[in-house]
Structure formats: C-alpha cells, structure tokens
Image: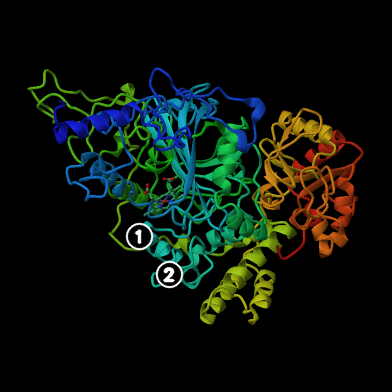
Amino acid sequence: MSAKKNPVTAAADKVVEKVQDAVRPGNEIPGAPGSRPPTVEEPTTPSGPLPPKPDQRGPDTYGPTGQETGVPQKKVAQGGERLTTAQGARLYDTDHSLKAGPRGPVLLQDHHLREKITHFDHERIPERVVHARGAAAHGVFQGYGAAEGISKAAFLAKDVETPVFVRFSTVLGSRGSADTVRDTRGFATKFYTTEGVFDLVGNNIPVFFIQDAIKFPDVIHAGKPHPDREIPQAQSAHDTFWDFVTLHTEATHHTLWNMSDRGIPRSYRMMEGFGVHTFRLVNAEGATTLVKFHWKPKLGVHSQVWEEAQITAGMDPDFHRRDLADAIESGAHPQWELGVQTFPDTEDQTFEGIDLLDPTKIVPEELAPVRPIGLLTLNANPSNYFAETEQVAFHLGNLVPGIDVTNDPLLQGRLFSYLDTQITRLGGPNFPQLPVNRTHAPVNDMLRDGMHQTAVHSGVAPYRPNSLDGGCPFLAGADTGAYIEVPVPVPSAAKVREAPVSFDDHFSQPRLFWLSMTPTEREHIVAAYTFELNKCYETAVKERALLVLANIDGELCAQVATGLGLPAPAPTVPLAEPQPSPALSQLGGSWPTDGRVIGIVTAGDQDLTGVRAVRRAVLDAGMVPLVIAPTGGKLDQDGEPVTVQRTFATARSTEFDAVLLAGAPAPGADASGARDAKVEDDTAVAAGIDPRVLLLITEAYRHGKALGAWADGADALRTAGVAPDAPGVVVADEPAAALSALTGLLARHRAWDRFEPGL
Ligand code: HEM
C-alpha cells in the first residue's frame, strides 16, 4: 500500500519537477519564459564583451566595443549566470506570483514579487530641471602644455592624459523629447584629473540669456511649456518665451544665436562648445590671466536646415544620440581642441571695451585669437544610460588648482545651483560616490552619513583637529597641491541690487553677429524668427519682438515684419557699427568627413558588384554606408550577399549626409528589381521611379545635400528632375569616381549655391 503524500511535500516535489524539467512541449524558444534555463556550465551566450568587428560597421551590426570605460561595472542578470534576487538568493521562477493554487489569490509572503515590483516602482528619478535630455560619452583629454605659462593645472601639462566624461544636451525639452529641436545645446565635460574633478559646464552658444543668476528661474519658466496645458514641448516657439526675451532685452544676443543655424546642429560632433563666462587661470608663480574657454570641433561646425530638423524630429527623435553613439562605435571618434582666449587680469576686467563679466558678450576671435591647449577625443559609449548619462552630476564649483572663477554674477549663482539641485535629483548628498561622479584623486574627507552613503568610514572623530583617531588628517599648502582661491581684492562698495552700467548695452553685439553672417545664414535667421513669432498668439509680443529686431538691423526687422504681416518699427537706439567677425560664420571651408552617413540606393539585385565596392570604399574613408533597397534582408546575385540596412519604407533623406544612386528603382520593385504589375496605374509609375525614392532624392536636393549616381542611378536623378550638372550633383561612369567626387562635395557640408531660401 502506498502512503498518501503530505500536501506540502507534494507541492515541493512539483517545484523540483518544474526546475528539473522547465521546458513545456512547444515552448522551446531560446530565452522565452518556460524554456530551459541556461546553466553556468553551458552558457548559451558569451558573457564577456564581444570583440569589435570593424568589417561590420553600420548601425545594424554594431556590437559592444569591449572598451575599458574606467567605470566599475556591476554585473547584473548576465547571460550564462543564474538569476538571483537582490540579496543573492537563486530563483527558479520569475514569471509567476506565489498563489494559493494556480487560480487562487496572490500571497503577501511572495518576497520575490514584492522585491521586483517595489524596485520597479522606484526606478525613475526626477529628470534635470533643465538639460533633461542628453547623450554622453567617455573619452580622454590630452594637454598640449601650451597653457603651462598661465595655469598650473596638472591636466593641462604637455602629454598628460586625463579620462573625461562628456554630456551633450538640449535645454528646454523633457527627457523623452526630440533631439533636433531649435534650442541651445549643453556641452558639459568632467575631467577626472589627478588633482580632483574639474567640470567645464558649457553650451554650444557663447553667450547667455541673462546677466544675473537671480533671473534663471524666470527665463526657464518662460522657455518651458506653458503651465496650463504643458505645451509646446522642447521649443521656444511660443508666447511666454518671446514675452520674456523681448521684455528682458539682454536676452537678444542669445536669442539671435538660437535663431541662427547654431540652434539646429547637424550633430553633437559638429558643435563648438563655450565656457561662456570669463574664468581666472593661475600659474605656478601665482600670476593670473582671465580666459574664455572654447571647444573647436575637428569636423567643423555644421547644422541641419529647419525643414530637415523638423522631419528628423518625427522620423528619428534620437537622431543626435544615435549619431554620437554610432560614430564612436564605428571608430570615427569625435575630437575637439580646447582653446582659450586670454585677457590681462586688469582691475576693470574689460578687454577692448568689452565687459568680461557680462555673460551676454563675446570677445571676437579677431581681437583675441583662440589658443589651442589640448585635445579631447570621445572613444567609448556609456554601457548603461541611467548609471552614467543620467546620474552624472556636473558642478561649476568642481575646480582644480590653477583654475578659479570671476565675479560674473551669472557664474556666481551657478556655483550655488548645481550642487543644490543634485541633492534632490540624486537623492541626498552622497552622489559624488556614484561611479560616474567619483574622483580619480584620493579622497580623505570628513563628510559622513546621509542618504545612500556607500562608504564604511572607520574612526570616531570626523572633525579636526582631533586627538582620538591615531593622528588626524593634515592640511595641504600651495606647494602640496591645495586648492587656494586667488586673493582677489573685493572693491569696497555699498550693498546694492544693481548691475554695472556696461551691462545696459543689449544690441551692439547682436548687430555684430548679424553683420558677420553670410547671406545664406541671414536667410535662415529671418526664416527662424518668422516661424517662431508666427507661432505666438499675442500681437503685442510680436510687435515688441519687431522693436527688438529694429535695434539689431533694419533689413532683418523689415523681412520678419513682412512674414508676420505687421509694420516694421523704427529703432529706438542708435545702431552700432561694429567690425564684423568672420569667425562667427560657420559656412565655408573644407572639413573631414569622418562618420558622415552615405545612403546607397539600389534597385535590387542588379549591379551588386558596384554597390559592394562603393560600400567598402565608404567604410575605408571612415564614413558609414547604409544600403537602401526595395525590401530588407540580403541582396544576393553572386554568392557574396550585401546586407540591406534601410528599405524604401524606412529610409528618409534626413538620415543621410549624401545619397548615392546605383539604380533607378521602379515603383513596387522587389529585391530582384522586378516591378509589381499591380501598381502600373500609379502616377509615379508614369515617372518610372518608386515614389519613396523620388522623395528621398528631391528632399536631399532641396536641403542642399550632395547627390551622386552611376549606371541607372543617373536615370533616377533625371526622373526626379535633378540636372546632372547642378551644383552638388555628380554623375559618373563608375562607382569609385562617383564616390570620390561626392566626398569632395561632402567636405563642404552642403551645396549652398543651390540652397532654396525659406528652408
Ligand atoms: C552660462 C550659463 C549656463 C550654462 C552654459 C549652463 C549649462 C548647463 C549644462 C550644460 C547643463 C547640463 C549638465 C548635464 O549635462 O548634466 C546644465 C544644467 C543645469 N543648469 Fe545650467 N547653465 C547655465 C546657466 C545656469 C544658471 C544661471 C543656473 C542657475 C542659477 C543653472 C542651473 C542649472 C541646473 C539646475 C541644471 C541641472 C543640473 C542637474 O540636474 O544636474 N544654469 N547647465
């Protein structure tokens, strides 16, 4: 007689059975719930980093780089290892709650369910109050030694290499907003120097909206979405923004830069960066120099055009984030030179009549050239967005010996704001202990406890002097690397809430910027003001904006007034006649094409030899080829298949810097190039080219992009109405010639001579 099984033992047996034979028939999709769990002995996927595959560059085939980021990695839920709870207990099931029977209620005792859901419930932290959306990368900074005479900062010395982390951002939008909106871009760099962390927290625009930090909440309240409906997202084209910047006319200069091409960069890799404020450098002898910091991109400064930026925001809201990551992953490591403009540290802190403490003013490079002092290279993508890009905390007060601040009232307020906001955003005062924020210099502080304290401090006397902890920490001096503020004399003056008189000049530098622009850049500025102000509802706001424009330039004001259907007012101040600064224009010159994206359109399986060769040549030139075909998968004519990265349905011109046409795809063509008989009546059939390819060509043409073709590709251009001898268009007999001419065109970014006004 067999004994009746105790129900508890029976249930335990069932669990064991489940673990031993977890696969139910028909449920053997690898990795699917219920499929056999991988064992440590028999890993199903490699748990280490994959080696880089230089031959497979292209966004669809990028694999992990395995590069050392310098950031300690926590291994969690790795393939090939057993799944555990946060406390390390091994799990046999993570898909079913613990229930009183398969159809019964869930039991409160299910610690795994509660741990999993509770942790999930608290996964989000507040986004940054400004600059919420960003993308970042690791890299290295190499000093040239050129700054040694003016700063004793160790990381600026010749050939010293310092790890860095750089975060780029937009200012106004939420964390999930689009990348290509018209806005200022943040450019924040954390240098992990041997003397402590130095943060250079700059923007891609060298001036700021306000002159005093006390107005920062106001300008941000005005720029962020309207508080009643929380619209519009991530843009300045609305009443409160224009209300503010026309009532606070010190904002005119920054606003003009935003309305210029600088407000819609092509890529984070193609932006300048500016420290904005004047800083004070100190050398080993204690002599001081005032400086402005500049980042100069090796790839030049380039922008999208407005229509392109708007299409991109819908087609690929992650455009800049993807561009940065793809470029780094494919080996096109972006580089910037750090440079300084230097000024004598005089008592009045002006240079050639320009107030160096006014953050709405620049010093033209023609008056004070930018001297390169080091090279920044971004060479590794973060491996976890939250841990690194989201938790990084920049702060202007993170300074190292040799770099000090000035009395710029905007800078002074920033010295307070960053640390303060991060205490909320990162949950207490211990965020400097997070891996991405951790200094690489030894730390021996007396800060204790607090939320998320991870250090286990020993000793009983966190104060000094003390006589209990076996010798208390001793202090450093100037010769032993202490950070000592420059003993700048403070003028004896009465306490006032006032700005210096020089801060009242709000229009001479906007006029300098306008006069320094090329005709094409001026057209863009007029179009941007006209677009933004036409988005405002209040006529009073538009009229006030025209008054501001009249004080910059009569022609600018008149053209925008026409677009708004309003009369152009007369200026209210005498117009200055500054010397234009050609360095402010971003057009002209010839630039490296590293990481540029070339779309290669093919009709299908025909001429795969040419497509393959051109793809290889694009890769060899350090650019990214994306093959665009009627359908996905692989094109295979001769046993050497070519992978399709984009189909006619997923490709849009905005993704490409240039387009090469290897064929003239007929409407409804499949991968073999054969036409679908069903679409014979379509109007595009009459034109003989797939309408999506037609759009690709006409859009790229309209946006001034380089277009090239060989073989049947020339027919595609002709059908799209593109003359083979139009500026920026090249038709060649073979692929190599087409690519070489195209690369030459690309080095100038766009064919501005065929650019259509109004875009
Ligand atoms: C020259 C003017 C300014 C520049 C260039 C600038 C630049 C930046 C940048 C690049 C970031 C993003 C940092 C990141 O990537 O995490 C940022 C964030 C921030 N800025 Fe500014 N900013 C300026 C003015 C100000 C002022 C005047 C204030 C306040 C008084 C301020 C407060 C903040 C705050 C609170 C954050 C969010 C920081 C965080 O949550 O980690 N900024 N700023």
When asked about the image quadrant of residue 39, the answer is top left
- Any mark on residue 214, and which? 1
Residue at 62%, 43% in the rendered image: 270
Query: Crowding at label 2, few (<14), some or many (≥20) Cα neighbours within 10 Å?
Result: some
Residue farthest front in this picture: 1
Query: Crowding at label 1, few (<14), some or many (≥20) Cα neighbours within 10 Å?
Result: few
In what element is the residue under mark 2? Answer: loop
Seen in the picture, residue 489 relative to 756 is either above or below; the reply is: above
Mark 2: amino acid:
His
588 or 364, which lies in front?
Answer: 588
Residue 575 location in percent, x, y?
Answer: 62, 68
Q: Is residue 505 visible?
A: no
Residue 149 location in percent, x, y?
Answer: 50, 28
Residue 262 location in percent, x, y?
Answer: 60, 53
In what element is the residue under mark 1? Answer: helix
Residue 397 location in percent, x, y?
Answer: 35, 41
Whether ligand 1 has any atom under 8 Å from the Cβ at mark 1 is answered as: yes
Seen in the picture, residue 10 relative to 503 is either above or below; the reply is: above
Distance, label 2 to label 1, CA atoms, is: 21 Å
Residue farthest left in this picture: 468
Mark 2 vs mark 1: in front = 2
731 or 39, which lies in front?
Answer: 39
- Any mark on residue 226, and which? 2
Seen in the picture, residue 566 relative to 430 is either above or below; the reply is: below
Task: Count the marks.
Answer: 2
For this view, does 730 lie left or right of residue 11? right
